């Protein structure tokens, strides 16, 4: 199969690239090794759209994060995914005020608007749960939170609507340069393209080396996160940071777009890119750090835990280069990679435009509508939906109030696994973790996809729930 541009990797960066490139008259294909998009780094992170002032002001990742923050507001509006502009606070204990002033100066140097150091009286009024030992905080009002996987699906749906071909379960196994093109082998076929963009996250260094290109080595760092019940939403209105250290932003308190609060992450060097375990020691470390910020936190408010792995490098900055003609590597896209992703795509398109004719796509489809969220609607809106489609009257997931219609629409939009449906609809994300809804979802999947129950998996091959 041939393509003008071949993207390797279906996380937030690959999705932003496919969305941005779909604006032009190009034949674009995206390869993803997992069964669905957003099953790698992008499924397990904090979901923060950072202001950008926490990072080294001279770093590429910092400049791209500041730009990415600016781009998200219009993206969320156009593609109908949730973005909550909650803002962020970096707090200072006694003796740390000078650090806030340094961060504020860096932020102003970067052009970040609205930065202000708030005193204890303001904190008592706006964040009353914060420890009384905290005397000052730097407010960054332009920060927000998104659902990373929901954002990936919004970008990819819009890209597909404009002709981008997406191939999941297509792990890259080899790459060769053939005259002026690149030949990319996968487990399911060979692709040829004059331009390859390597956005393979944790495996971006390996993909580059398949092409005979040396890039910075990926050093995986694991971060454990803990999700609290919605009843704990009163703990914070904004993202809360301690004063960052050189190696990490610290353990945070993060409101989410769905009403839960999240705490974490830890920071631990690991040897395995697929090391996603959580631990008692990680939980205790997170709780100890967070209770310094918010003493009222109780561990019985935790309803779920997960771990993500970040693709860090020794250099500590993004590697965004056309290392050989027609082969662009995006390596070391660690935090704030989620924030920077739209700006990374923008930069790559500019690089591509230096040697490729980027004619606007005729008939470009600009807007996309999300799956209706029954839980968030008023009674009149709910009744209107049920009259149009009775499946909206059948509740599948009680914890999150998800209907049969939402599950069926997620399948129509590409969900092929239980996690794919979960990430699109929030089924299985409540306190019962799918005890009530899993079999109902599997029944709908079997009917809609015309597959046996034994073929239904949590997240792809090897994670099937039923053995025949």
Image (cartoon, rainbow, N blue to C red):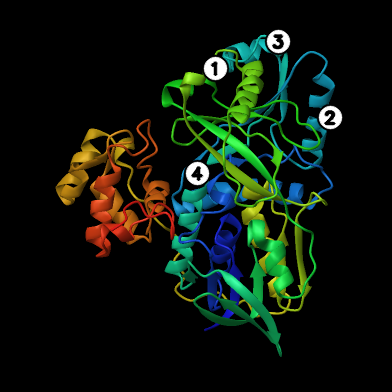
Q: Disc 4 vs disc 3: Cβ atoms closer than 8 Å?
A: no
- The answer to which quarter of the image holds residue 120 is top right
- Direction front: furthest residue: 468
Q: Work out which residue is located at the far bottom of the displayed protein and give it.
A: 179
**Coordinates of residue 283 in the picture (x, y in percent):** 59, 27
The residue that mark 3 highlights is: 133
Q: Earlier in the sequence, mark 3 or mark 1?
A: 3
Viewer-proximal residue among 330 and 90:
330
Q: Name the residue under label 1.
A: 297
Q: Nearer the viewer, mark 3 or mark 1?
A: 1
Image location (x, y in percent) of residue 339: 63, 47
Q: Earlier in the sequence, mark 3 or mark 2?
A: 2
Q: What element carries label 4?
A: loop
Q: Which mark is residue 147?
A: 4
Camera-side residue of 292 and 136 = 292
Q: What is the crowding at mark 4: few (fewer than 14 residues within 10 Å), some, or many (at least 20)?
A: many
Q: Can residue 187 be seen in this view?
A: yes
Q: Could you tell me if the residues under marks 4 and 1 are in contact, i.e. CB atoms within 8 Å?
A: no
Q: Position of residue 213 (x, y in %)?
A: 78, 72
Kindly report the distance in space between the C-alpha atoms of the residues bearing marks 4 and 2: 30 Å
């Amino acid at each position: 199969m041939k393509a003008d541009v071949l993207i390797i990797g279906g996380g937030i960066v690959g999705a932003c690239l496919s969305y941005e490139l779909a604006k032009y008259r190009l034949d674009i294909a995206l390869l993803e090794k997992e069964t669905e998009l957003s099953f790698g780094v992008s499924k397990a992170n904090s979901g923060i759209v950072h202001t950008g002032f926490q990072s080294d002001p001279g770093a590429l990742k910092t400049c791209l994060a500041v730009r990415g923050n600016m781009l998200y507001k219009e993206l969320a509006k156009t593609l109908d995914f949730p973005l909550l502009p909650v803002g962020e606070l970096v707090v200072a204990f006694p003796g740390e005020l000078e650090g806030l002033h340094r961060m504020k100066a860096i932020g102003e140097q970067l052009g970040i608007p609205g930065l202000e150091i708030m005193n204890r009286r303001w904190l008592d009024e706006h964040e009353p749960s914060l420890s009384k030992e905290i005397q000052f905080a730097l407010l960054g009002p332009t920060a927000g939170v998104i659902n990373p996987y929901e954002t990936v699906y919004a970008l990819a749906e819009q890209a597909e609507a404009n002709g981008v071909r997406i191939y999941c379960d297509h792990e890259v196994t080899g790459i060769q340069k053939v005259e002026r093109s690149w030949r990319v082998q996968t487990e399911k076929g060979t692709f040829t393209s004059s331009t390859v963009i390597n956005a393979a996250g944790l495996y971006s260094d390996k993909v580059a080396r398949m092409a005979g290109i040396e890039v910075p080595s990926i050093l995986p760092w694991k971060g454990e996160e803990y999700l609290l019940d919605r009843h704990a939403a009163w703990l914070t209105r904004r993202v809360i940071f301690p004063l960052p250290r050189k190696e990490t932003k610290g353990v945070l308190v993060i409101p989410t777009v769905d009403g839960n609060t999240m705490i974490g992450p830890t920071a631990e060097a690991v040897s395995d890119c697929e090391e996603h375990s959580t631990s008692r020691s990680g939980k205790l470390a997170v709780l100890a750090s967070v209770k310094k910020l918010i003493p009222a936190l109780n561990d019985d408010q935790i309803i779920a835990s997960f771990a993500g792995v970040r693709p860090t490098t020794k250099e500590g900055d993004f590697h965004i280069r056309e290392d050989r003609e027609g082969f662009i590597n995006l390596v070391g896209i660690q935090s704030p990679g989620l924030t920077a992703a739209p700006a990374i795509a923008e930069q790559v398109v500019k690089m591509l435009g230096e040697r490729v004719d980027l004619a606007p796509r005729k008939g470009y489809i600009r807007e996309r509508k999300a799956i209706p969220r029954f839980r968030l609607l008023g009674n009149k809106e709910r009744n209107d939906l049920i009259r149009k489609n009775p499946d909206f009257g059948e509740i599948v997931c009680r914890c999150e109030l998800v209907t049969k219609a939402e599950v069926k629409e997620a399948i129509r939009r590409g969900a092929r696994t239980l996690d794919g449906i979960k990430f699109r609809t929030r089924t299985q994300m409540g306190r019962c973790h799918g005890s009530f809804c899993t079999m109902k979802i599997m029944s709908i999947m079997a009917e809609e996809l015309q597959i046996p129950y034994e073929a239904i998996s949590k997240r792809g091959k090897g994670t099937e729930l039923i053995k025949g």
